[in-house]
Image (tube, rainbow, N blue to C red):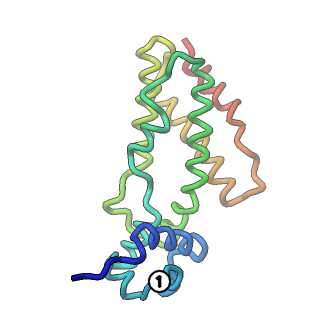
Amino acid sequence: MARPRSVSNEEIIHAARLCFLEHGSQCSTTLIAAAVGLSQAAIFKRFGTKEALIKAALRPPDVTFFKEMFGEGPDDGPVEEQILGIILRFQKHLARVMPMIATLTAGKVRHKGMPKVPLLLQAHLSEWFRAGVDQGRMAGSPEMAASALMGAVQMHVFMNHFHPQSPALDAEALAGLIFKGMSL
């Protein structure tokens, strides 16, 4: 009978994420194992390879996250305020995952088998804008509105991550611009 695990996979993944974000993808699995009180062999027994551990630790969120972030479409409240809420939630999400994306990219980790997050995000956000058009509360191209919002937020988060002195995103101005572009 196997002995019960004293350290969960989630604890290993959390420790690995912290180590990879601090030291990059070249971080030693020995360091990660020491952080959770296991041997390096125990880490490899659970994850197989260092690349598998990196992917588990820095993997993007489940795709259902985006439906939760945006909802099914605008509710009865002011659309511009809802767009602002989406911008702020997306900005917060990107600020959290940008270091993970940068670490994966710098480490040349193969993305095979990982979800195509930007495509999924654009599809869900386009659906949100399309629902607003279908409700008769907006006009224009849902895909272009989604692309413009994503591009503006991603650019600001990217710049802030690599150049912290860069100007902050004016989320209210962006929401107003998107709303005006989709106005009837």
x and y percentages locating residue 149 in the rendered image: 56, 35
Q: Is residue 120 above or below residue 3?
A: above
Q: How many marks?
A: 1
Query: Residue 89: x, y in percent?
Result: 58, 40
Left or right of 160 in this view: 148: left
**Front in this rendered view, residue 148 or 16:** 16
Kindly identify which residue carries mark 1: 33
The residue sitting at 37% across, 84% down in the picture is 42
Q: Is residue 58 left or right of residue 175?
A: left
- Specify the quadrant that holds the N terminus: bottom left
- Tell me what residue is drawn at x 57 percent, y 20 percent: 79
Q: Is residue 127 left or right of residue 14?
A: left
Residue drawn at (55%, 75%) of the image: 19
For mark 1, give the secondary structure. Answer: helix
State the image coordinates of residue 171 (x, y, percent, origin top left). Answer: 68, 35
Q: Height in image: 28 above or below 87? A: below
Indicate the quadrant where residue 169 lies: top right
User: Is residue 18 visible in the rendered structure shown here?
Assistant: yes
Badge 1 amino acid: Ala
For this rendering, which residue is in front, 122 or 65? 65
- Image position of 5 with respect to 180: above or below: below
44 or 26, which is in the foreground?
A: 44
Residue ID at (34%, 75%): 47
Question: Where residue 106 sits: x, y (%)?
Answer: 52, 70
Instruction: Please rate how many residues cluster around mark 1, counting C-alpha atoms within 10 Å: few if below 14, some from 14 to 19, many from 20.
Output: some
**Quarter of the figure with residue 176:** top right
User: Where does the C terminus fall, quadrant-wise?
Assistant: top right
User: Is residue 108 visible in this depiction of the protein?
Assistant: no
